[in-house]
Structures are given as C-alpha cells and as structure tokens.
Amino acid sequence: MKAAITAIGGFLPDNIVTNFDFEKILDTTDEWITTRTGIKQRHIENDPAKATSDMGAKAVEELCKKRGISPEEIDLLIVATVTPDMVFPATANLICSKVGAKNAWGFDLGAACSGFIYGLATGAQFIETGRYKKVVIVGADMMSRIIDYTDRTTCVIFGDGAGAVLLEASKDDNGIQDFILHSDGNGAVHLHMKAGGSLLPPSHDTVNDRKHFVHQEGQAVFKHAVYNMAEVSAKMMEKSKLTANDITWLVPHQANKRIIEATSSRMGISTDKVMMNIEKYGNTTAGTLPLLLWDYEKRLKAGDNLILSAFGGGFTWGSMFIKWAYDGSKSGK
Ligand code: UT7
C-alpha cells in the first residue's frame, strides 16, 4: 500500500515586505537581492499575537475543506518547523486544538528546510502499514521571529508561511514511491541559532549579544546546498530509473534561485519543469515545498512524476519521488 497526497492547504500572512522596503532600512538594493537570490518580496506576519500554529491551522482548515473531511477524522498530525510557538508543548498539539482535530495525536519535527520531506517520509509509514487512514503533514515557519533585521545577508532571504498536505492510502500505484534522506551535524557550525536551548539558555547576555537569531554563513551553506541538493536529486532519479524526460516536475526547496538552477541543471531538467515561487515568498524554511505544491496544484495530473528536493540547517538534505495521485484542476483553491 502506498501513501498518496490527496489534498493541499496553504497560508501566507497578508503583510508583504518588498526589496524596496529593505532598501529603506538596510544597506542593500533590489538589484542585489534579485540577482543573488531571485527574491522580490516575502510575507511577514506583523501581528505580534500570531504564531506558527495560527498559520499551520489555516493551512489544515483549507485542506480539510477541499477534501470534504472533518478535522476529527485526522489520526496523526506532524509539524515540520524550526519556529514552534513555544519550546513546548509541540506546535502540532496547538494546531490540533485550534482546528478541532480531537482524535489526532501529533508531534513536531525539527529538520529545518528539509523538514517537510522528513515529515512526508515519516507520515507515509503510518499509511503504508495500514495503521492510520489520514495523516496530515504541516510545513510551517514564522522565520521573521528569529531573523536579525540588521544582518543584511541573512534577513533578505527569509519569509513566513505554511503549507499542509493530507496523506491517505493510494487507490493505485500512485503516491510516495521512494526517498533518500541525509543529515550531518558537522554542518551545524554554519547554520544555527546560538541561544535559547539547553546549551545556552536565555539570559540578558544572550539577548544583548543577539544570539537568539539565525546565524548563517551564507557562502559555506550555499556550497553545501548546491552540491548536496543536486547530488541527492540525481541519485533519486537514478535509483528510480527516471530520465529527465520522465520527470514532470522538480519541486526544489526555495532558498536561492541559483541553488535551484544548479540542481535542475545537474539533473538535466529544463526550467519549464521546475516549480518556483521564491520571487513571491522568499525562503519559508519548512513551508517552501508544500507552498509550491499549493501554488502549482491546478497544473498537477494523476501519474505525474515529481522529484522533491531540499537542503537546510543541520545540515539536513534529501529527495523524494512521488507519483502524483489526483487531477489538481478539480481541487478548487
Ligand atoms: O534554506 C536554508 C539554507 N540556506 C541557504 O541555502 C542559503 C545559502 N546561501 C545563499 O543563498 C547566499 O550565500 C546568500 C544569499 C545568503 C548570500 O549571497 P552571496 O552571493 O553568497 O553573498 P556573500 O555573502 O558572498 O556576499 C557578497 C557581497 C559581500 O560584499 P563584499 O565583501 O564582496 O564587498 C557582502 O557584504 O555582497 C554583500 N552583501 C550584500 N550587499 C547588498 C551581502 N548581503 C547583501 C545585501 N545587499 N543584502
């Protein structure tokens, strides 16, 4: 039995911050951001009362409505995030209570930008074994809450957003076919948040020293991302015996347009087969892949071959081969 995605929901905060807005507060230009990253704007939540669970709950509500199911039918809900509402309880628990998923249990999964693929791989096991009928995977990050807006190299790339998918048993051979996942803690030095955990609990010093923000050594992460995302995607193709012609869509993590181009070029895939929305949303971390599926849903058809790929903090990276299970044009957004 295969696990198939049968519905998608998404959510972006209303407030949009453009590159021109950054020109007013930072030593930067629209030209630099556009040519180095491909990003033109990002959505940033400006209501201090809102958190990651609010975005995730909206995405789950939309997904349930589109599939015509009650949240009470959800058995398990996994949230991939590095920006949970609180250290505990899990954001998954908060989303379940916000949407009324009374019969579900859930947990958070921390794999940064690869979190959504990790979540799909994990959730699929519960469907494939027949234990559960409906598993929801949420990829959600409110990156603006952990970004230092005086660090021009890092702050311009991130945005806020959430996407969610429903996994159910496939009626045919479509669905999740295979995946390759990796992690390497040696990469932590290049991309991390220094304080707030058990190693360096919050204190006046950690706040004064700006240690509660994303620390990213852009160039080092860039090199690892280009190599590993391209390599793991090419391996996924080989393992699945797919040529570039067989692939309908590459669904790559949206961190930098240049990383996406390097990945598609290594795979020999033309740009018209590459899902891309980085110019509108920036890097929403665990949100990028479900938000791509959400944006492109109407163009997806049953039997399409999708290769998902991601690279992020940890380091974590991976790729997944999905045979799409339904006609997206029939699922209204
Ligand atoms: O999703 C999680 C994984 N994260 C990633 O995959 C991100 C990977 N890294 C990147 O995407 C890129 O490294 C960045 C977009 C973060 C930075 O781009 P870059 O081309 O690697 O820039 P850089 O750090 O090498 O800086 C080049 C120059 C420097 O000036 P000098 O030293 O050459 O004079 C920077 O100070 O660009 C300068 N710079 C900027 N200039 C204008 C850095 N940020 C900016 C900026 N505006 N916002």
Image (tube, helix red, strand yellow):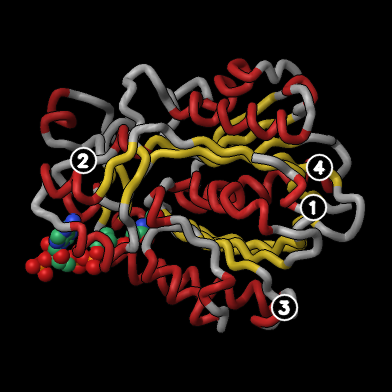
Q: Position of residue 203 (x, y in %)?
A: 19, 24
Establish whether ligand 1 lies closer than 8 Å to the Cβ of label 3: no
Residue to which mark 4 is pinned: 168
Q: Report crowding for label 2: few under 14, some 14 to 19, many 20 or more residues within 10 A (C-alpha).
A: some
Q: Is residue 187 visible?
A: no
Residue to which mark 3 is pinned: 246
Q: Is residue 254 left or right of residue 56?
A: left
Which circle's residue, 1 or 3, is located before the other in the chain? Answer: 3
Q: Nearer the viewer, residue 19 or 135?
A: 19
Residue to which mark 1 is pinned: 326
Query: Whole-Å distance between the Cαs marked 1 and 4?
Result: 12 Å
Query: Whole-Å distance between the Cαs marked 1 and 3?
Result: 18 Å
**Element type where label 4 sits in the image:** strand
Q: State the residue at coordinates (27%, 53%).
A: 216
Q: Position of residue 255 (x, y in %)?
A: 39, 58
Q: Is residue 116 left or right of residue 257?
A: right
Residue 127 higher or lower than 73, as above or below: below
Which circle's residue, 1 or 4, is located before the other in the chain? Answer: 4
Which circle's residue, 4 or 3, is located before the other in the chain? Answer: 4
Looking at the rendered image, the disc whose residue lies closer to the viewer, 2 or 1, is 1
Tell me, yes or no, whether the two marked residues, 2 and 3, touch with CB atoms within 8 Å: no
| Residue type of the residue flagged with mark 4 | Glu
**Element type where label 2 sits in the image:** loop
| Residue type of the residue flagged with mark 3 | Asp
Looking at the rendered image, the disc whose residue lies closer to the viewer, 2 or 3, is 3
